[in-house]
Amino acid sequence: MLRTRGILDLMPVSPIDGARSRGRERPLIAVTTSEMRDPPEHLTKDQADPPRREMALGLRYLEAIESSGGVPVVAPPMGLVAAEALLDAVDGLCLSGGPDIHPSAYGQEPHPELGPTERELDAFELALVRAADARSLPVLAVCRGAQLVNVARGGTLIQHLPDVVGDQIEHRQRERAENLTHAMRLEPGSLLSEIAGWHDGAVNSFHHQAVDELGYGLTATGWAPDGTIEAFEAPDRPFLIGVQWHAECLIGWPEHVRLFQAFVAACRVGGGDPRARATEPVGG
Ligand code: MN
Protein backbone atom coordinates (compact mmCIF):
# COMPACT_ATOMS: atom_id res chain seq x y z
CA MET A 1 0.00 0.00 0.00
CA LEU A 2 1.28 3.43 -0.88
CA ARG A 3 1.81 5.59 2.16
CA THR A 4 1.39 9.29 1.97
CA ARG A 5 4.08 11.06 3.87
CA GLY A 6 6.18 13.93 2.65
CA ILE A 7 8.02 13.35 -0.58
CA LEU A 8 6.22 10.08 -1.21
CA ASP A 9 3.18 12.13 -2.15
CA LEU A 10 5.11 13.07 -5.25
CA MET A 11 5.65 9.50 -6.32
CA PRO A 12 4.63 9.04 -9.92
CA VAL A 13 2.47 5.98 -10.46
CA SER A 14 2.31 5.86 -14.22
CA PRO A 15 5.08 6.03 -16.78
CA ILE A 16 5.76 9.22 -18.65
CA ASP A 17 4.84 8.83 -22.31
CA GLY A 18 7.49 8.37 -24.91
CA ALA A 19 9.86 5.97 -23.18
CA ARG A 20 13.01 6.20 -25.22
CA SER A 21 13.91 3.70 -27.87
CA ARG A 22 17.36 5.01 -28.51
CA GLY A 23 18.86 1.70 -29.55
CA ARG A 24 22.40 2.64 -28.56
CA GLU A 25 24.70 -0.34 -29.15
CA ARG A 26 26.66 0.34 -25.99
CA PRO A 27 24.08 1.88 -23.66
CA LEU A 28 25.09 4.45 -21.06
CA ILE A 29 24.17 3.28 -17.57
CA ALA A 30 24.23 5.58 -14.55
CA VAL A 31 25.55 3.90 -11.40
CA THR A 32 24.92 5.49 -8.04
CA THR A 33 27.83 5.93 -5.69
CA SER A 34 27.25 3.86 -2.62
CA GLU A 35 28.91 5.41 0.34
CA MET A 36 30.18 8.67 1.79
CA ARG A 37 33.56 8.55 3.44
CA ASP A 38 35.46 10.91 5.67
CA PRO A 39 38.84 12.22 4.50
CA PRO A 40 41.19 9.31 4.08
CA GLU A 41 44.40 9.33 6.03
CA HIS A 42 46.67 9.73 3.03
CA LEU A 43 45.02 12.99 2.05
CA THR A 44 46.03 14.64 5.27
CA LYS A 45 49.69 14.23 4.35
CA ASP A 46 51.86 16.64 2.43
CA GLN A 47 51.67 16.87 -1.35
CA ALA A 48 48.10 15.68 -1.58
CA ASP A 49 44.73 17.30 -2.14
CA PRO A 50 43.17 19.02 0.86
CA PRO A 51 41.13 16.66 3.07
CA ARG A 52 37.49 16.38 2.03
CA ARG A 53 34.59 13.99 2.19
CA GLU A 54 34.48 11.53 -0.66
CA MET A 55 32.08 9.21 -2.42
CA ALA A 56 33.04 5.57 -2.73
CA LEU A 57 31.86 2.98 -5.23
CA GLY A 58 33.06 -0.58 -5.67
CA LEU A 59 34.56 -1.09 -9.11
CA ARG A 60 32.72 -4.40 -9.46
CA TYR A 61 29.50 -2.67 -10.58
CA LEU A 62 31.33 -0.78 -13.30
CA GLU A 63 33.17 -3.90 -14.45
CA ALA A 64 29.96 -5.94 -14.55
CA ILE A 65 28.25 -3.34 -16.74
CA GLU A 66 31.19 -2.89 -19.07
CA SER A 67 31.80 -6.60 -19.52
CA SER A 68 28.09 -7.02 -20.29
CA GLY A 69 28.32 -4.49 -23.11
CA GLY A 70 27.32 -1.25 -21.39
CA VAL A 71 29.16 1.95 -20.54
CA PRO A 72 29.00 2.78 -16.83
CA VAL A 73 28.59 6.43 -15.82
CA VAL A 74 29.12 7.19 -12.13
CA ALA A 75 26.32 9.31 -10.68
CA PRO A 76 27.20 11.15 -7.48
CA PRO A 77 24.59 13.02 -5.40
CA MET A 78 23.31 16.10 -7.22
CA GLY A 79 20.26 18.33 -7.36
CA LEU A 80 17.07 17.15 -8.96
CA VAL A 81 17.44 19.36 -12.04
CA ALA A 82 20.86 17.90 -12.77
CA ALA A 83 19.63 14.41 -11.96
CA GLU A 84 16.77 14.74 -14.46
CA ALA A 85 19.25 15.90 -17.09
CA LEU A 86 21.43 12.90 -16.31
CA LEU A 87 18.49 10.56 -16.74
CA ASP A 88 17.73 12.24 -20.08
CA ALA A 89 21.21 11.29 -21.19
CA VAL A 90 21.46 7.68 -20.05
CA ASP A 91 19.73 4.44 -21.03
CA GLY A 92 19.48 2.79 -17.62
CA LEU A 93 20.15 3.08 -13.91
CA CYS A 94 22.04 0.69 -11.65
CA LEU A 95 21.63 1.26 -7.93
CA SER A 96 24.60 0.03 -5.93
CA GLY A 97 24.79 -1.38 -2.45
CA GLY A 98 25.77 0.74 0.53
CA PRO A 99 24.79 1.83 4.01
CA ASP A 100 21.43 1.36 5.69
CA ILE A 101 18.64 3.71 4.67
CA HIS A 102 17.48 5.94 7.50
CA PRO A 103 14.14 4.45 8.62
CA SER A 104 12.49 7.88 8.65
CA ALA A 105 12.24 7.34 4.88
CA TYR A 106 9.62 4.67 5.58
CA GLY A 107 8.11 6.10 8.74
CA GLN A 108 9.94 4.10 11.41
CA GLU A 109 12.17 4.83 14.37
CA PRO A 110 15.78 3.62 14.22
CA HIS A 111 16.43 0.07 15.43
CA PRO A 112 19.34 -0.33 17.91
CA GLU A 113 21.24 -2.38 15.30
CA LEU A 114 20.79 0.20 12.53
CA GLY A 115 24.13 0.91 10.86
CA PRO A 116 25.48 4.35 9.91
CA THR A 117 23.10 6.28 7.68
CA GLU A 118 23.47 9.14 5.19
CA ARG A 119 20.19 10.96 4.92
CA GLU A 120 21.32 13.31 2.16
CA LEU A 121 22.36 10.31 0.08
CA ASP A 122 19.02 8.65 0.84
CA ALA A 123 17.09 11.73 -0.30
CA PHE A 124 19.03 12.03 -3.55
CA GLU A 125 18.82 8.35 -4.43
CA LEU A 126 15.10 8.14 -3.60
CA ALA A 127 14.43 11.12 -5.87
CA LEU A 128 16.62 9.63 -8.61
CA VAL A 129 14.85 6.27 -8.42
CA ARG A 130 11.44 7.89 -8.62
CA ALA A 131 12.48 9.95 -11.63
CA ALA A 132 13.96 6.90 -13.39
CA ASP A 133 10.90 4.83 -12.51
CA ALA A 134 8.58 7.50 -13.94
CA ARG A 135 10.49 7.29 -17.23
CA SER A 136 10.29 3.48 -17.31
CA LEU A 137 14.07 3.54 -17.52
CA PRO A 138 15.51 0.05 -17.04
CA VAL A 139 16.64 -0.26 -13.40
CA LEU A 140 18.79 -2.94 -11.78
CA ALA A 141 18.98 -2.42 -8.04
CA VAL A 142 21.44 -4.27 -5.81
CA CYS A 143 21.23 -4.71 -2.03
CA ARG A 144 20.73 -1.20 -0.57
CA GLY A 145 19.63 -0.22 -4.07
CA ALA A 146 16.85 -2.80 -3.99
CA GLN A 147 15.80 -1.56 -0.57
CA LEU A 148 15.73 1.98 -1.98
CA VAL A 149 13.45 1.00 -4.85
CA ASN A 150 11.09 -0.62 -2.39
CA VAL A 151 11.05 2.44 -0.13
CA ALA A 152 10.71 4.75 -3.15
CA ARG A 153 7.51 2.90 -3.99
CA GLY A 154 6.17 3.22 -0.45
CA GLY A 155 7.41 -0.09 0.98
CA THR A 156 9.12 -0.77 4.30
CA LEU A 157 12.22 -2.63 5.43
CA ILE A 158 13.07 -5.14 8.12
CA GLN A 159 15.69 -3.12 9.98
CA HIS A 160 17.56 -6.08 11.44
CA LEU A 161 16.90 -9.47 9.89
CA PRO A 162 17.93 -11.73 12.81
CA ASP A 163 15.03 -10.23 14.81
CA VAL A 164 12.59 -11.65 12.29
CA VAL A 165 14.16 -14.73 10.71
CA GLY A 166 16.67 -15.79 13.37
CA ASP A 167 20.16 -16.89 12.46
CA GLN A 168 19.67 -20.17 10.60
CA ILE A 169 20.95 -18.43 7.48
CA GLU A 170 24.04 -16.25 7.53
CA HIS A 171 22.95 -13.22 5.55
CA ARG A 172 26.23 -11.50 6.30
CA GLN A 173 28.55 -14.11 4.94
CA ARG A 174 32.17 -14.29 6.00
CA GLU A 175 33.26 -15.97 2.80
CA ARG A 176 34.47 -13.97 -0.16
CA ALA A 177 31.89 -12.19 -2.27
CA GLU A 178 32.31 -14.54 -5.26
CA ASN A 179 31.13 -17.49 -3.17
CA LEU A 180 27.50 -18.62 -3.14
CA THR A 181 26.56 -19.20 0.48
CA HIS A 182 22.79 -19.51 0.81
CA ALA A 183 20.06 -21.11 -1.22
CA MET A 184 17.67 -19.04 -3.32
CA ARG A 185 14.33 -19.86 -4.87
CA LEU A 186 13.07 -17.81 -7.80
CA GLU A 187 9.44 -17.63 -8.81
CA PRO A 188 8.93 -19.70 -11.98
CA GLY A 189 7.72 -17.50 -14.81
CA SER A 190 9.08 -14.30 -13.30
CA LEU A 191 11.27 -12.10 -15.45
CA LEU A 192 14.19 -12.74 -13.10
CA SER A 193 13.76 -16.49 -13.26
CA GLU A 194 13.54 -16.46 -17.04
CA ILE A 195 16.67 -14.35 -17.26
CA ALA A 196 18.57 -16.46 -14.76
CA GLY A 197 17.41 -19.73 -16.25
CA TRP A 198 16.88 -21.40 -12.86
CA HIS A 199 14.36 -21.67 -10.03
CA ASP A 200 16.49 -23.19 -7.30
CA GLY A 201 19.98 -21.87 -6.90
CA ALA A 202 22.30 -20.06 -4.54
CA VAL A 203 23.61 -16.53 -4.04
CA ASN A 204 26.06 -14.54 -1.96
CA SER A 205 24.75 -12.47 0.96
CA PHE A 206 25.97 -9.27 2.61
CA HIS A 207 23.01 -7.66 4.33
CA HIS A 208 21.27 -7.37 7.68
CA GLN A 209 18.18 -5.65 6.32
CA ALA A 210 15.63 -6.72 3.73
CA VAL A 211 12.28 -5.87 2.21
CA ASP A 212 9.37 -6.11 4.64
CA GLU A 213 6.18 -4.67 3.15
CA LEU A 214 6.51 -4.49 -0.64
CA GLY A 215 6.08 -1.12 -2.31
CA TYR A 216 3.38 -0.20 -4.79
CA GLY A 217 3.25 -2.47 -7.82
CA LEU A 218 6.21 -4.65 -6.80
CA THR A 219 6.07 -8.45 -6.80
CA ALA A 220 8.39 -10.68 -4.78
CA THR A 221 10.18 -13.13 -7.06
CA GLY A 222 13.03 -14.54 -4.94
CA TRP A 223 13.28 -15.91 -1.40
CA ALA A 224 15.94 -17.30 0.90
CA PRO A 225 14.99 -20.54 2.71
CA ASP A 226 14.15 -18.52 5.85
CA GLY A 227 11.51 -16.59 3.93
CA THR A 228 13.52 -13.40 3.45
CA ILE A 229 12.47 -11.59 0.27
CA GLU A 230 15.65 -11.41 -1.79
CA ALA A 231 14.31 -10.32 -5.17
CA PHE A 232 11.38 -8.42 -6.61
CA GLU A 233 10.32 -6.91 -9.88
CA ALA A 234 7.76 -4.47 -11.23
CA PRO A 235 5.47 -6.12 -13.78
CA ASP A 236 4.35 -2.64 -14.89
CA ARG A 237 7.85 -1.75 -16.09
CA PRO A 238 9.93 -3.23 -18.92
CA PHE A 239 12.86 -3.92 -16.57
CA LEU A 240 12.81 -3.04 -12.89
CA ILE A 241 14.50 -5.72 -10.82
CA GLY A 242 15.81 -5.54 -7.27
CA VAL A 243 18.10 -8.23 -5.86
CA GLN A 244 19.33 -8.44 -2.30
CA TRP A 245 22.47 -10.35 -3.29
CA HIS A 246 25.57 -8.78 -4.82
CA ALA A 247 25.09 -9.84 -8.43
CA GLU A 248 27.97 -7.62 -9.54
CA CYS A 249 30.38 -9.99 -7.78
CA LEU A 250 28.93 -13.11 -9.41
CA ILE A 251 29.54 -12.45 -13.09
CA GLY A 252 32.01 -15.34 -13.13
CA TRP A 253 29.10 -17.75 -12.62
CA PRO A 254 27.25 -18.75 -15.81
CA GLU A 255 23.94 -18.86 -13.91
CA HIS A 256 24.43 -15.33 -12.61
CA VAL A 257 26.11 -13.38 -15.39
CA ARG A 258 22.90 -13.29 -17.39
CA LEU A 259 21.28 -10.79 -15.02
CA PHE A 260 23.70 -7.99 -15.91
CA GLN A 261 23.65 -9.05 -19.57
CA ALA A 262 19.86 -8.91 -19.66
CA PHE A 263 19.90 -5.53 -17.90
CA VAL A 264 22.32 -4.07 -20.43
CA ALA A 265 20.26 -5.61 -23.25
CA ALA A 266 17.13 -3.92 -21.85
CA CYS A 267 19.01 -0.60 -21.72
CA ARG A 268 20.20 -1.11 -25.29
CA VAL A 269 16.68 -1.40 -26.67
CA GLY A 270 15.36 1.47 -24.59
CA GLY A 271 13.00 -0.51 -22.43
CA GLY A 272 11.61 -3.07 -24.86
CA ASP A 273 10.75 -6.61 -23.79
CA PRO A 274 13.92 -7.97 -22.20
CA ARG A 275 12.53 -11.52 -22.21
CA ALA A 276 12.94 -11.53 -25.95
CA ARG A 277 16.50 -10.36 -25.76
CA ALA A 278 18.02 -11.95 -22.68
CA THR A 279 19.49 -14.75 -24.74
CA GLU A 280 21.01 -12.62 -27.47
CA PRO A 281 24.78 -12.41 -27.46
CA VAL A 282 26.24 -9.33 -25.86
CA GLY A 283 27.26 -6.81 -28.49
CA GLY A 284 30.84 -5.70 -29.02
MN1 MN B 1 20.65 -13.06 1.94
Image (tube, rainbow, N blue to C red):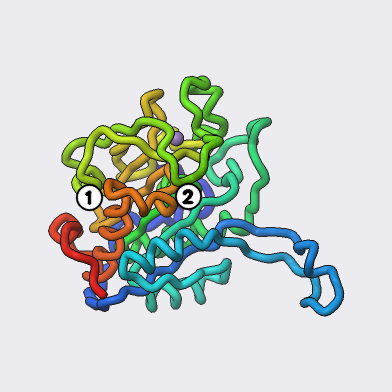
The residue wearing badge 1 is 195
- Residue lying farthest left? 276
Label located before the other in sequence (2 or 1) = 2
- Classify 67 as above or below 182: below
x and y, in percent, of residue 83 in the image: 49, 71
x and y percent of residue 121 in the render?
59, 58
The picture places residue 120, in percent across and down from the top left corner, at 63, 58
Residue 152 visible in the picture: no
Location of the N terminus by quadrant is top left
- Amino acid type at image mark 2: Leu
Q: Which residue is mark 2?
A: 148
**In the figure, 189 relative to 97: above or below?**
above
Horizontally, residue 182 falls left or right of residue 44, namely left
In terms of depth relative to the viewer, which is nearer, 237 or 176? 176
Q: Residue at x 79, y 77 (%)?
A: 48
Instruction: Give the residue drawn at x 67%, y 45%.
Output: 116
Task: Please state the quadrant of the image where ligand 1 appears.
Answer: top left
In the rendered structure, are the residues bearing label 2 and label 1 in contact, judged by CB atoms less than 8 Å apart?
no
Say whether residue 11 is left or right of residue 217.
Answer: right
Label of residue 103 in the image? none
Q: How many marks?
A: 2
Q: Is residue 275 left or right of residue 258?
A: left
Residue closest to the far right: 46
Callout 2 secondary element: helix
